[in-house]
Amino acid sequence: MPDRTDTIAGVDANHDGVRDDIEAWIARLPDNEEQKYWLGRVHTAVTNSMLVDVKDEYALREVANDITLTTDCQMDAYPPDTLLGYHRGAEIEKLTVNTRARKKAYRRFNASQNGTVSFSYPHEACIRP
C-alpha cells in the first residue's frame, strides 16, 4: 500500500532512508541487488530534494549532485540495451512523489534548479558504502 501520509518523508520504521512502501516495492522486483540498491538511493535523493531548504544554495547543490549521481549509477546498473533502467527510475520517482504535498515540494526544488548546470558522473563514481 502506498504511503500517503501528510509528511514529506513518509514512514521509514527502520530508519534506513528508504520509505517503507518503497522498500517493499523494491524488494518485490526481480532485479539484482545492485539494481535494487541504486533504486533505493534514487528514492532517498528525491526525498531529500523535497526536504531541502531552497534558500540554502549549498544544500541545493548537494542534493542536486546526489540526484545526478544516484540516477547515473542506477541507470548504469541496468543493461544499456534495454529501457528497464529508465522505466524503473521513472517509477521510483512517481512512487516517491505521490501526494499533493510531495509534488509541491518536488516542484519547488525543481524550480530552484532553473538555470543551473549539472554533469554526469563516470561509472567509477558508483561506489557502494
Image: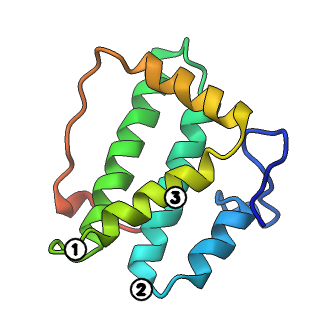
Residue 5's spot in the image, x, y percent?
A: 84, 46
Question: Based on the displayed image, in which of its 4 quarters is residue 19 positioned?
Answer: bottom right
Disc 1 or 3, which lies upstream in sequence?
Answer: 1
Instruction: Say if 37 sits above or below 15 in the image.
Output: below
- Tell me the distance, in whole angstroms, between the alpha carbons under discs 1 and 2: 15 Å
Q: Which residue is mark 1?
A: 82
Residue 90's spot in the image, x, y percent?
A: 43, 55
Of residue 49 and residue 28, the one placed in the foreground of this image is 28
Q: Is residue 15 left or right of residue 110?
A: right
Q: Which residue is mark 2?
A: 32
What number of labels is visible?
Answer: 3
Q: Secondary structure at mark 2?
A: loop
Q: Secondary structure at mark 3?
A: helix
Of residue 47 and residue 25, the one placed in the foreground of this image is 25
Disc 2 or 3, which lies upstream in sequence?
Answer: 2
Q: Residues within 10 Å of mark 1 (few under 14, many from 20)?
A: few
- Label 3 sits on what residue type? Ile
Of residue 94 and residue 7, the one placed in the foreground of this image is 94
